[in-house]
Amino acid sequence: MDRRLISDEQTLDNAGVRVTAVRLLVLHEIRTRFHDTFSLADLEAALPTVDRSTLFRTLTTLSESHLLHETDDGSGAHKYCLCQCDDTHHHTGHVHLTCRRCHRTYCLTDVKIPPVPMPEGFVAEETEYIIKGVCKECSNRGER
């Protein structure tokens, strides 16, 4: 079932995450505000009444429960996005585009990472696919 179609409370419960007011608030904010990747700082700005350490612990819990996944876009900051994977190890994740100018990372949720044959004995645990370039907004501003 598409995780976006069930309630935040049911989503947490289905993932085995204890439902708390802060977790519900954070998951709701992520689902409604962030349609691409976001950072801890982005979430802090969206929820200024929740302290940074609580937000970080909540993001960690949601990541460990495979509701979010972390993306390394090369910026040095952890970025997160809602998991759209069909499994719990992010093998069938989606492609990300990262702008080298503004450092925004976009999710291409309809573009799945193709399967890659693994050498015998190698067990893949996570897959990331990031394309780096210049986004439309930066290109339109003539930034090079």
Image (cartoon, rainbow, N blue to C red):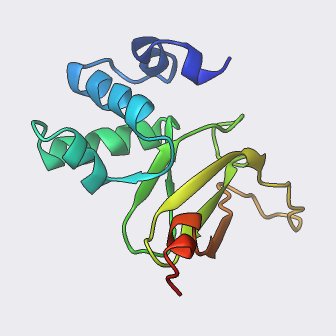
Q: Residue at x 20, y 48 (%)?
A: 45
How far from the left and from the top, in percent, is residue 122?
78, 64
Please indicate whether residue 25 sits to the left or right of residue 105 in the image. left
How far from the left and from the top, in percent, is residue 32?
41, 29
- In the image, residue 40 sits, relative to residue 18, either above or below, namely below
- In the image, residue 16 sits, relative to residue 135, either above or below, namely above
Q: Residue at x 64, y 45 (%)?
A: 89
Give the residue at the far bottom of this rendering.
144
Residue 57: quadrant of the picture: top left
How far from the left and from the top, in percent, is residue 92?
74, 46
How far from the left and from the top, in percent, is residue 49?
9, 36
Please indicate whether residue 135 sits to the left or right of residue 76 in the image. right
Please indicate whether residue 113 sits to the left or right of residue 100 in the image. right
Name the image quarter holding the N terminus: top right
Give the total number of marks visible in the rendering: 0
Give the residue at the far front of this rendering.
141
Residue 98: quadrant of the picture: bottom right
Please indicate whether residue 36 sits to the left or right of residue 33 in the image. right
Q: Residue at x 34, y 43 (%)?
A: 59
- In the image, residue 15 sits, relative to residue 30, either above or below, namely above
Q: Residue at x 49, y 82 (%)?
A: 143
Of residues 18 and 80, the one drawn nearer to the viewer in this rendering: 80
